[in-house]
């Protein structure tokens, strides 16, 4: 292939060459990746791309485009190159500090909303939910995608979003602010429930590295045990890949996404064993637990919920037929 920088390229040719370069490198979804990278450098949308195949690209755009294609061919995820990923119809900033939101995680939101609506109907209230009176926690928020999607759907709910990673919380807070949900979500640095336990009260990660000042609102102050709420919904997509599976992971995941977001332990399902018993202590009676599962987690995780503390267990498959969401109600 001639050096792209040395020639002027139209949109159609640039796209064709990009797809070819990625295909040669065995990049999955090569056409989509080339399109997204070209859209990113030209700052255009897909309609423009296909409406103007003859338009000539400027040399700067060609250079940037081929530089990104080479990085993609070497294994960097497209989302790290464009800095964004869509989830639940919203655009999220992503960096190597957070897991790239996956489409299957949207099933968690669907299950949570369905089960909350059923709970309302059962109590004789209107199934149309605004989240009024609901307190929700998202454990391991990463980019904030779950907490923010719920904030969009349940504008009156009070939402807490936790993560053990301070760097991830900074991204989640940026996403909440850019999308306009910052006042609805409290972000907490927390190892599972440590921010809600007596000894483990932790501080909110301050926005832009500023320290919380005395007298600021509760979402900028440490939580103390007597402030720790009981939740109506506890939702989590915990790390669930086994360390023993590391060598089978695609390079995009293994070398570019944060280990703390990927690995749940040697087997993968270890974190559920810590999370589920604790969850029971932090949910209201009839409170809902909604968990994402790894492709083979169900046999290890379901028995943890087969106890008198839990009822109405439900397994929901993803579009590939994999048991993806396990949900249950606190008795
Ligand atoms: C699989 S990622 C999910 C991120 C995001 N919720 C999503 O669905 O895209 C798991 C997240 O849990 C966080 N995490 C790992 N161990 C944790 C722990 N012990 N307590 C709280 N968060 C934890 C990781 O930092 C990571 O952001």
Image (tube, rainbow, N blue to C red):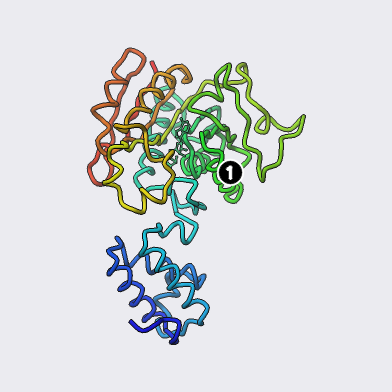
Q: Disc 1 on helix, strand or loop?
A: helix
Badge 1 residue CB within 8 Å of ligand 1: no
Q: Which residue is mark 1?
A: 170
Between 238 and 1, the residue placed more toward the observer is: 1
- Quadrant in which the N terminus appears: bottom left
Q: Quadrant of residue 10?
A: bottom left
Which quadrant of the render holds ligand 1?
A: top left
Percent across and percent down for residue 80 are: 46, 57
Packing grade of label 1 (10 A; few <14, some 14-19, many >=20) is many
Residue at the (55%, 46%) spot, across then down: 171
Specify whether 227 is left or right of 301: right
Give left or right: position of 161 versus 325: right
Q: Position of residue 14 (x, y in %)?
A: 39, 78
Residue at position x 60%, y 37% from top? 184
Q: Is residue 44 above or below residue 207?
A: below
The quadrant the C terminus occupies is: top left
In the rendered view, tell whether residue 149 sits above or below residue 4. Answer: above
Q: Is residue 248 above or below residue 158?
A: below
At which x and y percent is residue 58? 51, 82
User: Residue 160, located in which quarter of the rendered image?
Assistant: top right
């Amino acid at each position: 292939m001639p050096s792209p920088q040395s020639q002027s390229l139209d949109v159609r040719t640039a796209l064709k060459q990009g797809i070819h370069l990625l295909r040669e490198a065995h990049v999955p979804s090569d056409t989509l990746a080339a399109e997204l990278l070209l859209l990113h450098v030209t700052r255009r949308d897909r309609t423009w791309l296909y409406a103007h195949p003859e338009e000539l690209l400027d040399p700067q755009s060609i250079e940037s485009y081929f530089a990104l294609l080479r990085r993609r061919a070497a294994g960097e995820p497209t989302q790290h190159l464009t800095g964004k990923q869509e989830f639940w119809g919203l655009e999220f900033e992503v960096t190597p500090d957070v897991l790239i939101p996956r489409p299957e995680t949207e099933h968690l939101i669907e299950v949570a909303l369905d089960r909350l609506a059923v709970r309302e109907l059962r109590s004789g209230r209107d199934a149309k939910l605004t989240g009024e009176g609901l307190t929700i926690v998202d454990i391991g928020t990463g980019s904030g995608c779950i907490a923010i999607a719920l904030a969009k759907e349940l504008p009156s709910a009070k939402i807490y979003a936790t993560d053990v990673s301070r760097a991830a919380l900074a991204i989640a807070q940026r996403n909440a602010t850019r999308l306009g949900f910052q006042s609805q979500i409290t972000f907490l640095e927390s190892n599972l429930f440590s921010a809600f336990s007596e000894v483990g009260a932790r501080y909110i990660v301050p926005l832009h590295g500023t320290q919380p000042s005395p007298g600021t609102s509760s979402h900028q102050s440490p939580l103390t045990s007597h402030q720790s709420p009981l939740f109506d919904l506890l939702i989590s997509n915990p790390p669930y890949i086994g360390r023993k599976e590391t060598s089978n992971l695609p390079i995009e995941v293994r070398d570019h996404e944060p280990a703390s977001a990927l690995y749940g332990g040697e087997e993968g399902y270890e974190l559920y064993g810590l999370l589920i018993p604790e969850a029971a202590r932090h949910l209201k009676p009839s409170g809902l637990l909604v968990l994402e599962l790894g492709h083979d987690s169900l046999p290890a995780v379901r028995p943890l919920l087969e106890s008198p503390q839990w009822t109405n267990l439900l397994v929901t498959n993803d579009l590939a037929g994999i048991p993806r969401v396990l949900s249950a109600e606190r008795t």
